[in-house]
Amino acid sequence: MRRAILLPTLITTLASALPSSSPSPLSSPTTPSSPSLSPREDACAGDPSTAGYCTPISYTDTTTTTVTTTVTNKNTTASAPSTSDCQQTCRSILGDAGDWGVDFAGQPAGYRDDLYLGACGFGVARETDADAAGFAFSVHNQDILDVVRGSIDRFAGSHDGRVSAEGTMECQGHVVRWFVG
């Protein structure tokens, strides 16, 4: 009989210790898809105090446009990845050791290095498709997480929780294009 009384008390105590459902201070107040995620649930937050190699410069919403490069991407709102897909990408990225090497030496103009393949992929290319310069640089996990999260925060709220984006970032002295989607 005593166990039956203690169990409800224990459940009540544990339930009151759970965090509230208020928005995380790390989430964007303008994006409906982010505020519901606590820092523990937002895999794309990573550890912002970790220094990477790249600094994002620009973000362009490609969720409802067709992007044509040497490698053709066709994303519409219906086929663009969901924020859940992108959160899974971030969880997978966090499982990697930390540094991703990109080497454009010997690669043709228009070459794109898809660092992560999945429903919400991540890739990089030279700044322009006409550029054939050969150079190498590193990308840290946190660099990728920052770009994916920035894309979600900026664009997913306008497309029913779906996102596809591209932009530029500076990595170890080189301006490169990045792609999410």
Image: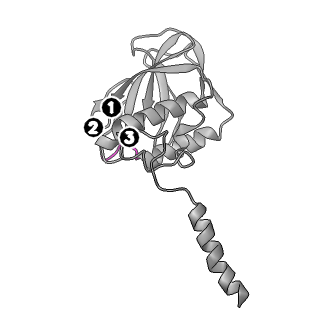
Identify the residue shown where x is 29% and y is 41%. 158
The amino acid sitting under disc 1 is Asp
Identify the residue shown where x is 49% and y is 39%. 26
Question: Helix, strand or loop at disc 2?
Answer: loop
- Quarter of the image containing the N terminus? bottom right
User: Which numbered marker is on residue 29?
Assistant: 3
The one of 32 and 7 positioned closer to us in this rendering: 7
Residue 107 lies, in percent from the top left, at 52, 16
Q: Using a 10 Å C-alpha cutoff, classify the residue at mark 3 as few (fewer than 14 neighbours), some (14 to 19) or many (20 or more).
A: few
Establish if 151 lies above or below 34.
Answer: above
Question: Helix, strand or loop at disc 1?
Answer: strand
Identify the residue shown where x is 50% and y is 42%. 118
Q: Is residue 119 visible?
A: no
Query: Can you tell which quarter of the image residue 4 is in?
Result: bottom right
Establish if 21 lies above or below 151.
Answer: below
The one of 152 and 134 positioned closer to us in this rendering: 152
- Residue extending furthest toward the bottom: 1
Please indicate whether residue 134 sits to the left or right of residue 65 in the image: right
Residue ID for mark 2: 64
In contact (CB < 8 Å): disc 1 and disc 2: yes
The amino acid sitting under disc 3 is Pro
The one of 160 and 34 positioned closer to us in this rendering: 34
Question: Helix, strand or loop at disc 3?
Answer: loop
Identify the mark nearer the N-term, 2 or 3. Answer: 3
Residue ID for mark 1: 61
Q: Which residues are magenta?
A: 78-82
